[in-house]
Amino acid sequence: MTSIGTIFQREINAYFLSPVAYVIIAVFTVFSGYFFSIMLGITQESTLRYSLAYTQFILSILTPVITMRLLAEENKTGTIEPLMTAPVTDFEVVFGKFLSAWALYNIMIAPTALYIIFLAWVGSPDYGAIIASYIGLILMGGLFISIGLLVSAVTKNQIVAAVIGIVALLILLVIGLASSGNEGWFYNALKYIGTYDHWDTFTKGIVDTRDVIYYVSFTALLIFIVVRIVESRRWR
Amino acid sequence: MIKVDHLAKRYADVYAVDDISFEVNQGEILGLLGPNGAGKTTTMRILTCYMPATSGTATVAGYDVFRDSINVRKQIGYLPENVPLYPEMRVKEYLSFRAKLKKLPYRERKTKIDECLEKCRITDVQNQIIGTLSKGYRQRVGLADTLVHDPKILILDEPTIGLDPNQIRQVRQLIKELGEKHTILLSTHILPEVEMICGRVIIINKGKIVAMDTPSNLATQLRSGNNIMIEVRGNGEKIKNSLSAIKGVKKVVWHDRGELNNFTIEAERGMDIREDVFANIVKNNGIIREMKQASITLEEIFHQITMQEQEVTI
């Protein structure tokens, strides 16, 4: 199990040794700040709910950029070979990489804490709702990263990994948005698969076990699939 | 230390490795020699647990490569072809990462890394970023990585490819030194390399083992004819005729250089005709200035073996 930590540490270092981490954090901060100020101006409410709704859109585009290099780069440069011939299990490699991307994701959203300070200054925000939103944001990040990791595992090309990841996340967002407010088994199924509804509950300040289970189980399933994909070179 | 038993690996319809068996004994340097695409890398990847075999078994240090892969991986140091490294890391940082990955205890790590840096002569670049290093240095960083957990077995895939002659010499020297403490399996398609560092050679072609022996034994075994080269002062015409008459001589090639004559005499396999040649030349009033037996190099053997194979298949 110590190898997870070793892989995690290397991956985090790799993010911050390249411009990737800084660019992503800067882009996210600019856009989330923009949406925060716009929504605050329109609604005049001291809440994060409306600006976070837009945040999901930015995250759908930025998270695949975080994850694109994780396995695609190793596949391309061949470093996967020394890595996998070291005494580490496939799970340790995949999970270490997952955790490092998740950590970067959390570092990326950390500056939004400043908005809370600002809200507290101009009004009286509902802290419970804000905490619930952050729990949702972090859980959603895990899901987004596992999707990006999956795409990165099946290709050698980082750009392809990013583009497919973005498309997949936007589809998940869109099917949730489009079916929201509609009834019937078909829409209910889409609502369940899509990320929007689950995310919306958190921003309202409700931590529903169903939504937590949705994110956690979906993430776990995807990580399991990625481990299988990494392992699959052993069958080919 | 390594035991390979009827190993085969199939890609779609093509056998990359086709039913090979061999053993590597403790403390031995075994060379896997073959043209590109012969199945050397595939064999090594199976032995290092990177990919499984289609059929057959292999054990490394007593552990099965498929069932006991983690234990196998603890025993080996593997240098893949072209030495893939993380370009953004520094040399020492990379080795420290690899040492941790290979579960080297914290207390030993620092001394072990320094020792490897020293052994591979990369102490002076230890704080340099790997991406800025030359090919020769990268190769040595890769070698240092294979040594860092002090494995019993080293598996080196084309360790000298893409290096300049000086670097090749250094790397070979290093491998030779390492051979004193480790069991080494290395692959190459460069013949002099095998002659210089390997105790035993396996020649592999199209996934099959075509020959396996010590380099010098291979040379004697496969000597199809033995050639004698002589330089003689005297009447060339007369000497040529008398040489051709010696029993066992297949062919005499004569280069007339006026006073001096050069002959290349091809004798039948296993016949030593040198004394007869001497007596004949003396009889014809010739003076021998030089006589030597042309020994066949591994290069010729390699060429012969791989060519024979091709002729059969065509």
Image: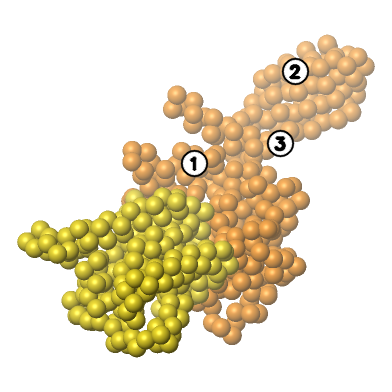
Instruction: Say which chain tag 2 marks.
Output: B
Q: Residue furthest right?
A: B259
Q: Quadrant of residue A202?
A: bottom left
Question: What numbered label is drawn on residue B38?
Answer: 1
Secondary structure at badge 1 equals loop
Question: What numbered label is drawn on residue B253?
Answer: 2
Secondary structure at badge 2 equals strand
Badge 3 and badge 1 in a common chain: yes
Image position of B58 (left or right of B256): left
Instruction: Say which chain tag 1 marks.
Output: B
Determine whether label 3 and label 1 are within 8 Å by CB.
no
Q: Nearer the viewer, residue A184 or B131?
A: A184
How far is disc 1 from disc 2 in space, using C-alphas? Answer: 37 Å
For disc 2, the neighbor class at 10 Å (few under 14, some 14 to 19, many from 20) is few
Apparent colour of chain B: orange
Quarter holding the N terminus of chain A is bottom left
Where is residue A222 drawn, in percent x and y? Answer: 29, 65
Where is residue B75 drawn, in percent x and y? Answer: 49, 69
Q: Nearer the viewer, residue A180 or B306?
A: A180
Q: Identify whether A153 is placed above or below B94.
A: above
Instruction: Say which chain tag 3 marks.
Output: B
Q: Identify whether B74 is placed above or below B155.
A: below
Image position of A90 (left or right of B29): left
